Image: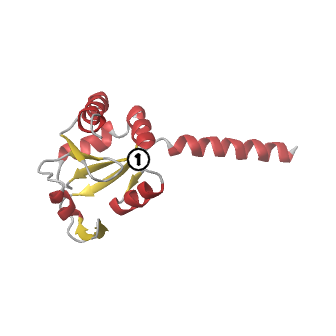
Amino acid sequence: MKFKYLLSFCLLALVSFSLQAQEEITWMKFEEAIAANEQSPKMLIVDVYTDWCGWCKKMDKETFTDPKVIEHINKNFYAVKLNAEDTKRTFEFMGKKYNEAQMAAAMRVRSYPNFVVIEPKLQNIAQLPGYRTADQFLTGLDDLIDKAFKNKP
């Protein structure tokens, strides 16, 4: 009898854990996403933000908590948070050393929030700037990918 309750509890915990895993976007550091992409290629989406950006905070609070956005991002992208003003944390990319501010500048980000999509071969990028509601974000992201990457060899 106790085993039955223990088994039920374990199954409930497992289901709860798997549901919880989809309750937020799996954010990575830039170099973690690059390493994951080497193992299993897919696009990267880089959320380039600053600490003072009110629209960035609004995206985090409203858009990035929407279940449709969470599911779409986690399924199709490696998601990266990149602070455009952080000059302390460094990493290597394509044989060069960058801090987060340098990487944001290398991607030509000049406004916040800004979402940079990088294709799996890490050669081409496209930007989706500005605050967007969940539906606007998903539509804009799909349109951007269609225009920037679908018709390229």
State which quarter of the image contains the N terminus: top right
Residue at image position (18%, 63%) is: 101
Q: Can residue 45 be seen at all in this image of the molecule?
A: yes
Question: In the rendered image, which quarter is residue 73 located in?
Answer: top left
Left or right of 67 on screen, residue 80 = left
Q: How many marks?
A: 1
Residue 79 at x, y percent in the picture: 36, 49
Question: In the rendered image, which quarter is residue 145 located in?
Answer: top left
Whether 87 is drawn above or below 79: the answer is below
Left or right of 7 on screen, residue 33 = left
Whether 93 is drawn above or below 82: the answer is below
Depth order, front residue of 39/31: 39
CA neighbours of label 1 inside 10 A, class few (<14), some (14 to 19), many (20+): many
Residue at image position (35%, 60%) is: 29
Residue 104 at x, y percent in the picture: 19, 57
Indicate the amino acid at tag 1. Answer: Lys
State which quarter of the image contains the C terminus: top left
Residue ranking furthest to the left: 110
Q: Can residue 115 be seen at all in this image of the molecule?
A: no
Residue at image position (44%, 37%) is: 71
Residue receiving disc 1: 42
Residue 108 at x, y percent in the picture: 14, 53
